[in-house]
Amino acid sequence: MTKLINSLNFAKQLDKEDSLSNYRNLFHIPKDVHNKDLIYFCGNSLGLQPKSTKSFINKEMKDWANLGVKGWSNAKNPWLEYHSYLTNEMANIVGAKPLEVVVMNTLTVNLHLMMVSFYKPTNKKFKIILEADSFPSDIYAVESQLVHHGYNGDDGIILWETKNSKNKYQELENIFLENKNEIALVLIGGVNYYTGEYFNLKKITEIGHKYNSIVGFDCAHAAGNVQLNLNKVGADFAIWCSYKYLNSGPGSLSGCFVHERHAYNNINRFRGWWGNDLNNRFNMREPFQTIAGADGWQISTPTILSMAAIKASLEIFKDVGMKKLCEKSTQLTSYLEFLLRNLNSTKINIITPKDPASRGCQISIEINDANKKFHENLTNLGVITDWRDPNVIRCAPTPLYNTFEEVYLFVEKLKLLI
């Protein structure tokens, strides 16, 4: 990016030079009562709907109407294999091999399924490391797993403090040294939902494996946002949702990664008929034969209509590619950070890392002496962001559909309130 300038004309010029600008036209942009586009910086909570989503779902609706149960084998996209239509592109997005990825269930359900298989506590080795300010659902899941295994949740969880830490990875290793052979699992958010920090996943994995601990990542705020390279990172497992940066609709399905080194292992898991080998699946009286790879963790019949929505979004990602998306993401957040710092206001504090390599398309702004009324006033000015108590606004200028002009206008509206 050229030297940044604090002006509307400069922002508009950046949009003219943006090779991805036309992708905005592929999405429905929410509007205000005057039919004017809202500034939607909330893709880190719920991504916008691709205009193609309806047609992808309608294809399956039509086959359902015309074929009924025969749609499982005779639909244009036979439903029996539908989950596999998502695998290759989802694997590309998270930097994995197709064998390692499956789309199934929802996020916390998949987290529980992964812990069923990979969290194997003993009387001595049972503790779990979470980053401080983990997403609450991760904490609840971990607490319940600890209790399920007969441990006290408070005693079993160790929080890794990362905010404002200059030597966070050394401090993570220090946790292992202080809790000798007691750490069974490291579970970290790939991108922290609160601060927007993108952690060094490979470094975390190396530390965890050095001390013979399982390493897993919740990539809900990372998938479709940053280049994950999960296979090379070497984590044992990862899970993510598809309704944030992957734009698949509210409450849609989750993705799951299991590293290829576990693909053919006889790992304990909760079983269901969709994880049974397809050649044997409908032989109801035959013993369970696990499918190799991540597919073997499936339990239930897939939800085709939700998968159709995911397929619509993945077609867009396939066309763009993560490399270009991440390049624009860096440009958007860099411009937003530049404009915010130009305000020279003591009322705001950016808590997202300054290094673009350590964040995705999110800037979290701490508003001093503010409460949720501040966020309501910002919303009334036509800006959709996410408020997190006690005083943080999470802003996600998303490269598929947000513009540099919107970044400029957002800061101008923020200026009216501080």
Image (spheres, grey):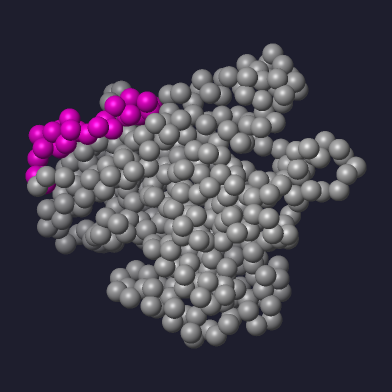
Of residues 208 and 172, which is closer to you in this image?
Answer: 208
Q: Is residue 17 magenta?
A: yes
How many numbered discs, if any? 0
Residue 290 percent across, percent down from the top left: 75, 49
Q: Which residues are magenta?
A: 4-29
Residue 141's quadrant in the figure? bottom right
Percent from the top left, x then y, of residue 103?
59, 42
Question: Percent position (x, y) of residue 196?
Answer: 35, 56
Relative horizontal placement of residue 212, taking residue 373 as reference (left or right): right
- Extreme-top residue of the structure: 66
For residue 257, above or below residue 314: below
Q: Is residue 8 magenta?
A: yes
Residue 140 in the image: above or below residue 281: below
- Please report the residue visible at 47 percent of the width from the left and 70 percent of the height from the top: 206
Residue at coordinates 36% horizontally, 34% vertically from top-left? 320
Left or right of 320? Residue 210 is: right
Question: Can the viewer see residue 110 in this picture?
Answer: yes
Q: Quadrant of residue 68?
A: top right
- 358 vs 289: above or below: below
Which residue does the image show at 63% across and 19% down from the upper left? 76
Does residue 138 appear to the left or right of 385 in the view shown? right
Specify the principal SS of the magenta part: helix
Q: Is residue 107 visible?
A: no
Q: Say above or below: 373 vs 158.
A: above
